Image (cartoon, grey):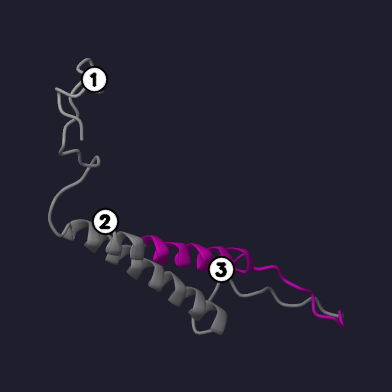
């Protein structure tokens, strides 16, 4: 390290503070942030349980299909909106798990 007497010393530069902390840093266990992370993990688990319950048939998904038309031998396929939203809900629940675990480990 250079001292002010050394030839490479730059006296024209401003002095750098030794104690620089990241923005928003608070010393301590940061319990509030860890509890928020735990809440996000619980929300992700609840989302995955709802998706599993709908896929397994334990929970209802949407309205019941209308009756089949008379005289048609082949069943008419009925599109259910849950077929689109359930995979998205599963992916977002897993994303919530990752974000929550990151918040718990490194607030």
Q: Which residue appears at 56% of the width and 68% of the height?
A: 86
Q: Which residue is mark 2?
A: 107
Q: Which residue appears at 16% of the width and 32% of the height?
A: 17
Cα gap from disc 3 to disc 1, whole angstroms: 63 Å
User: Is residue 47 highlighted in magenta?
Assistant: no
Q: Which residue appears at 47% of the width and 67% of the height?
A: 94
Residue 55 lies in what quarter of the image? bottom right
Compared with residue 6, is residue 49 higher up or lower down, i.e. above or below? Answer: below
Task: Point out the frontmost of discs 2 and 3.
Answer: 2
Q: Which residues are magenta?
A: 72-99
Residue 78 lies in what quarter of the image? bottom right
User: Is residue 91 highlighted in magenta?
Assistant: yes
Mark 3, secondary structure of its residue: helix
Q: Which residue is mark 1?
A: 10
In the rendered image, the quadrant that contains the N terminus is: top left
Mark 2, secondary structure of its residue: loop
The x and y percentages for residue 6 are 19, 24
Compared with residue 53, is residue 83 higher up or lower down, i.e. above or below? Answer: above
Compared with residue 1, is residue 102 higher up or lower down, i.e. above or below? Answer: below
């Amino acid at each position: 390290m250079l001292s002010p007497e050394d030839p490479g010393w730059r006296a024209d530069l401003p002095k750098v503070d030794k104690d620089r902390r990241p923005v928003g840093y608070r010393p301590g266990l940061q319990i509030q942030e860890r509890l928020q992370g735990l809440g996000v993990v619980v929300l992700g688990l609840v989302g995955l349980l709802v998706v599993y319950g709908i896929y397994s048939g334990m929970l209802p998904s949407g309205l019941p299909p209308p009756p089949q038309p008379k005289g048609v031998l082949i069943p008419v396929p009925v599109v259910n909106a849950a077929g689109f939203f359930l995979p998205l809900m599963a992916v977002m629940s897993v994303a919530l798990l990752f974000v929550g675990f990151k918040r718990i480990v490194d607030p």
